[in-house]
Structure formats: structure tokens, C-alpha cells
């Protein structure tokens, strides 16, 4: 009898809070993404010799908690806490060696916000979230968090701003808009502004996504003049794509101006990607070009990536990928940056390449 009472008391301790909070929900999700990589970075230390290394990489693996509470009259309280974890090196950080690819460790090192939402008017969020421009670029990247990630050619506008105020509109017949303002960006294309707390951000995107096709336009400005720069840096981005049966075609064009606050320090990035699905398999490739930086010649690069994906289940995918970046004599773009875990670095004028075997599991 005593054992039954104890068991009933323990069960009640878990059931009672759920019953009292039946108007709210918490969803736990995440992704484990690991790969074995053979990377020839042609790094600064060995720029002209074979600097190939083999790594086990954790590629933006994360654990996420998201919540929603019905407040009545169509109003909801919403929140999200996302934490990136390392699977390859538990170190001394605990909890899978918490790490943040933006440079800060700890629980909630990814997007973390709270806000209000309503079906008729959208959502307002306060905290830290993926920038609208970043999400516009992620939508067209066939090698997201893998070698060959488009962010290898990032102009500094794929951000996750701190101190952000964000508005997401509902979808009106496929049209949707997002606006974000950060009062303390502390991130910019030029490292000299990376910790300046007077730098602010404005970012906005508009997208039409209905049926098999989508197109989106984005604009972002980093207010560097408040930190003593001559100009604010700005970026325009257009992303588009569509499905034609089993074939998918994606593309992006962007132009950054006055990068780092320097007048005339402009650069264009553009490219295309395609994938063809065959049952549980998919072959994919993408090619991107970074133009010269302003009027300085031989500062551009070209990158291509090819890959093969195999769906082991609805939640698990195994893949093969190869990527190579060809730098001009005055450029040092990588092929292993973005959300990929290991990046050995690249010396000026060198051509990094790599091969990767990986697995992605969503839960």
C-alpha cells in the first residue's frame, strides 16, 4: 500500500502542473549534426604546402526549448531558448561543451527571446534572434552548416543580433515581412567594430512564398557612424527559388556597400544552386562568386560544392560533400566557414578544398 501511495504521489507531482497549465505548451527539439572531414585549408602557417587535416566536426548541433501560452482573445505569450552544443569535444564546459558560433558560451547561446503573438497581426519578440537577412540567405543554401556553405562568402550581414526588437508579420496570401532593430549590435563586417556597443542595426525582408516558387528581398544597415566610422555599412540581398517536379533551383544576389564604414569598399556576391531528388537520394551542387572589394583588383573568389544526400528516415540524413574555393591573389576566402564546425583557415591567394562525410539527425 505504501509503495502504491508513493508511486501515486510521484505521478501526481508531474501530472498536476500540466493540468493547471493546459493553455500552455513547451516543445523540445534539436539537431545533432556531425561529420568526418578531410580539409586542406592552405592555412597561414603552411600556405604553400599540403596542410590537410582530418577532423570530427560538430556543425551547429543544438538543443531547443520553445513555449507558447494562450492568453485569451487571440493573444499568445511566446518564448524560445536555443543552445548550441559540441559533440566532438566535451571539454570543461559541461552539457556537451556549450558553445556559440558567434563567440559566447553558455545556455541560450543561440536565439533566445520572449514576446507576444496573434494570428491576425503577427509577432513581436525581444531578445536575440536570427536576423531577417540571415534567414533569407539560409533559404537558398543547399550546404547549410556543411563545407561549401554560402556564408563562406558572407559580407558580414548573416547576423544574430543581441538587444533586438523584432516584428514578424502573418502571411497574407503568401506575402510575409520581417523587421528587426538592434540597439547594440556589437557585430559588423569590420572586426574593429566587433565590440563597440554604440553600433546599431536595422534589418528588413519581404518575401512571397506560395506554391512551388518563392522570391525575397532584404536590406540591412549597420550604424557604424555612431562608433566613429565615416559611413554606415549597408547590404541588399535578393533570394529566389522553386521546385520543378523533383528538381530544385535556388539563387542569391547581394551587394554590400561601404563595408566597415569605408567609402567605396563595396562587394557583390552571387550564385546558383540546384538539387535533383531520386527517391530517398538527392544530388546537389552550388556555385558562388565573390567580386573584387571596391576598386582593388584580384580580391575576389569563386566557390563550388557538390554533394549527395541519402535519407535514412524522415529525421536522419547521411551525406557526402566536396567543396573548393579558388581565391584571387589578394583574397583569402574559406570553403569551411559558416555553420561548419572546423575551419583551419586560409592564407591569401590559396585555394582551400575539403571532403566531408556526415550525418544529420533531427528530433
Image: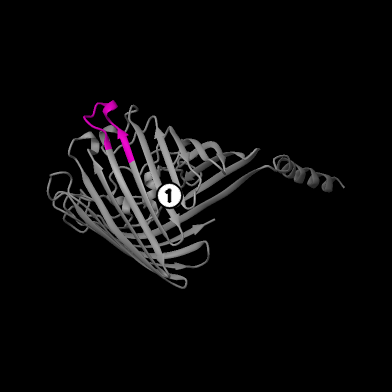
Q: Residue at x 23, y 34 (%)?
A: 261
Q: In the image, 80: left or right of 24? A: left
Residue hosting label 1:
89
Picture layout, residue 284 above or below residue 5:
below
Residue 49 at x, y = what percent? 18, 57
Residue 305 at x, y = what percent? 30, 62
* Residue 283: in magenta span: no
- Graded by Cα atoms within 10 Å as few (under 14), some (14 to 19) or many (20 or more), the crowding at tag 1 reads some
The answer to whether one can see residue 91 in this image is: no
Which residue sits furthest bottom?
A: 278
Q: In the image, 191: left or right of 126? A: left
The answer to whether one can see residue 274 in this image is: yes
Q: Which image quadrant: the C terminus?
A: bottom right
Which color scheme does this rendered protein use?
one colour
Picture layout, residue 359 above or below residue 231:
below
Residue 71 at x, y = what percent? 64, 37
* Residue 221: in magenta span: yes
User: Viewer-proximal residue, 257 or 289?
Assistant: 257
Which residue sits furthest front?
A: 173
Q: In the image, 131: left or right of 173? A: left
Q: Residue at x 61, y 45 (%)?
A: 26
Please give the count of numbered marks on the rendered protein.
1
User: Viewer-proximal residue, 102 or 260?
Assistant: 260
Question: Which span is picked out in magenta?
Answer: 220-233
> Disc 1 on helix, strand or loop?
loop
The quarter holding residue 335 reads: bottom left
Residue 155 at x, y = what percent? 28, 45
The quarter holding residue 145 reads: bottom left
Which residue sits furthest right?
A: 1
Q: Residue at x 40, y 54 (%)?
A: 139
Amino acid at each position: 500500500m505504501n509503495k502504491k501511495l508513493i508511486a501515486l504521489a510521484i505521478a501526481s507531482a508531474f501530472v498536476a502542473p500540466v493540468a493547471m497549465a493546459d493553455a500552455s505548451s513547451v516543445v523540445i527539439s534539436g539537431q545533432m549534426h556531425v561529420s568526418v572531414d578531410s580539409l586542406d585549408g592552405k592555412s597561414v602557417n603552411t600556405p604553400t604546402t599540403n596542410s590537410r587535416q582530418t577532423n570530427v566536426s560538430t556543425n551547429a548541433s543544438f538543443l531547443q526549448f520553445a513555449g507558447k501560452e494562450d492568453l485569451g482573445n487571440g493573444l499568445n505569450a511566446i518564448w524560445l531558448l536555443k543552445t548550441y552544443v559540441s559533440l566532438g569535444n566535451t571539454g570543461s564546459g559541461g552539457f556537451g561543451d556549450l558553445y556559440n558560433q558567434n563567440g559566447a558560451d553558455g545556455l541560450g547561446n543561440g536565439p533566445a527571446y520572449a514576446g507576444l503573438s496573434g494570428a491576425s497581426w503577427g509577432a513581436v519578440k525581444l531578445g536575440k534572434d536570427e536576423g531577417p537577412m540571415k534567414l533569407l540567405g539560409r533559404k537558398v543554401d543547399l550546404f547549410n552548416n556543411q563545407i561549401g556553405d554560402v556564408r563562406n562568402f558572407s559580407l558580414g550581414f548573416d547576423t544574430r543580433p543581441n538587444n533586438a526588437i523584432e516584428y514578424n508579420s502573418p502571411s497574407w496570401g503568401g506575402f510575409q515581412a520581417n523587421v528587426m532593430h538592434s540597439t547594440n549590435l556589437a557585430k559588423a563586417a569590420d572586426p574593429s567594430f566587433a565590440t563597440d556597443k554604440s553600433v546599431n542595426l536595422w534589418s528588413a525582408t519581404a518575401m512571397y512564398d506560395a506554391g512551388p516558387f518563392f522570391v525575397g528581398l532584404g536590406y540591412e544597415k549597420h550604424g557604424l557612424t555612431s562608433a566613429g566610422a565615416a559611413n554606415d555599412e549597408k547590404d541588399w540581398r535578393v533570394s529566389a527559388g522553386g521546385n520543378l517536379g523533383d528538381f530544385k533551383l535556388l539563387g542569391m544576389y547581394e551587394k554590400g556597400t561601404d563595408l566597415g564604414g569605408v567609402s567605396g569598399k563595396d562587394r557583390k556576391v552571387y550564385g546558383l544552386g540546384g538539387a535533383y531528388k531520386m527517391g530517398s537520394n538527392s544530388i546537389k551542387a552550388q556555385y558562388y562568386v565573390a567580386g573584387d572589394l571596391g576598386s582593388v583588383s584580384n580580391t575576389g573568389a569563386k566557390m563550388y560544392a557538390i554533394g549527395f544526400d541519402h535519407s535514412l528516415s524522415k529525421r536522419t540524413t547521411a551525406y557526402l560533400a566536396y567543396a573548393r574555393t579558388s581565391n584571387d591573389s589578394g583574397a583569402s576566402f574559406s570553403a569551411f566557414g559558416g555553420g561548419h564546425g572546423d575551419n583551419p583557415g586560409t592564407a591569401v591567394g590559396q585555394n582551400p578544398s575539403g571532403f566531408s562525410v556526415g550525418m544529420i539527425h533531427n528530433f
